[in-house]
Image (tube, rainbow, N blue to C red):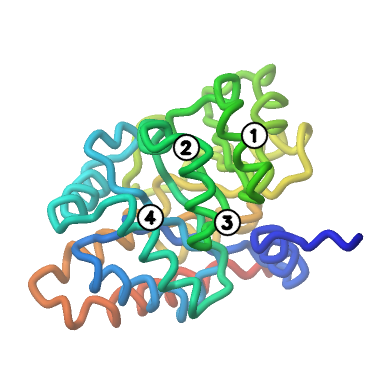
Amino acid sequence: MTVRMSRLATTFARTRAQNRAAFVAYVCAGDPDFDTSLAACRALLANGVDVLELGVPFSDPLADGLTNQLAAQRALESGMTAARVFELVRRLRAESETPIIFYTYYNLVFCNGVDAYVRAAKDAGVDGILTLDLPPEEAGPVTAACRAHGVDTVFIVAPTTPDARIPTIAAAATGFIYYVSREGVTGVRDQVAGNIAEALARIRKHTTLPVAVGFGIGSRAQVAQVAAHADGVVVGSALVNCIRDHLGDKAKLAAAIGAKAADLSAGVARG
């Protein structure tokens, strides 16, 4: 029997063959409203994004800085629900084979029933789920549901993660490892965190999965710095800021975020 590679595995294999990092773009689903969010996501997919990371709007996004907190608030106030997030994914999946992953919190998965939520995500076209506040030691129901429905799991390693925990995290992940390069919450920073090469080497001792790096990356130069070492580069707040800056003229938002993505994604090539 031939086993079909997942969209995530196929994408990282392609970018590796092209000697570049994958460009992973984060936006909050439904920010600032469904139609504008759909247009923004389409613009991202048309401008160099290899993996689309959709934040599922939540009232208590504890891993997020102010930029992404406000994005979630805008989305919720515009009427986004779990059903509307799945609909957004369905609309994008009808047009694109680009991998889509959810950046979410466990309460949103648990309160809908873990298996039912993962099944609905798969049916909509979601490829992977990153549950920010769910440690792998407590993730059994989610990892089992993801295995059952063919959805990849993504787990986080932080600068403060002890070496002894990395094998546990790596064993729970199937899509990629997300290395959070800074302590604290999301947000654009003036400089890329130090010691990324050393941190990635520490992680790669325990896994052959791709390792993507995020938190604090907001310019093409910073993308290039991280891409020299990482399998993927995650940019979020810089793109969400682009949405924020065009709230007064939504007609120009898609073009603006597309241009920003094109500029950032130009940094992923190596040498």
Residue 141, placed above or below residue 193: above
- Residue 144 numbered mark, or none: 1
When asked about the image quadrant of residue 80, the answer is bottom left
SS at badge 2: strand
Report x, y in % for residue 51: 54, 63
Report x, y in % for residue 97: 58, 73
SS at badge 1: helix
From the image, which quarter does the N terminus lie in? bottom right
Mark sitting earlier along the chain (1/3): 3
SS at badge 4: loop
Disc 1 and disc 4 in contact, CB within 8 angstroms: no
Left or right of 125? Residue 18 is right
Give the residue drawn at x 69%, y 67%: 15
Q: Mark 3 points at which residue?
A: 127
The residue mark sitting in front, 1 or 3, is 1
Disc 2 and disc 3 in contact, CB within 8 angstroms: no
Mark sitting earlier along the chain (3/4): 3
Give the residue drawn at x 63%, y 52%: 230
Per the model, the C-alpha gap separating discs 3 and 4 is 19 Å
Q: Mark 4 points at which residue?
A: 236
Q: What is the crowding at mark 4: few (fewer than 14 residues within 10 Å), some, or many (at least 20)? A: many
Q: In the rendered structure, which amino acid carries the disc numbered 4? A: Gly
Q: In the rendered structure, which amino acid carries the disc numbered 1? A: Ala
Report x, y in % for residue 200: 66, 40
The residue mark sitting in front, 2 or 4, is 2
Mark sitting earlier along the chain (1/4): 1
From the image, which quarter does the C terminus lie in? bottom right
Left or right of 172? Residue 90 is left
Report x, y in % for residue 41: 37, 71
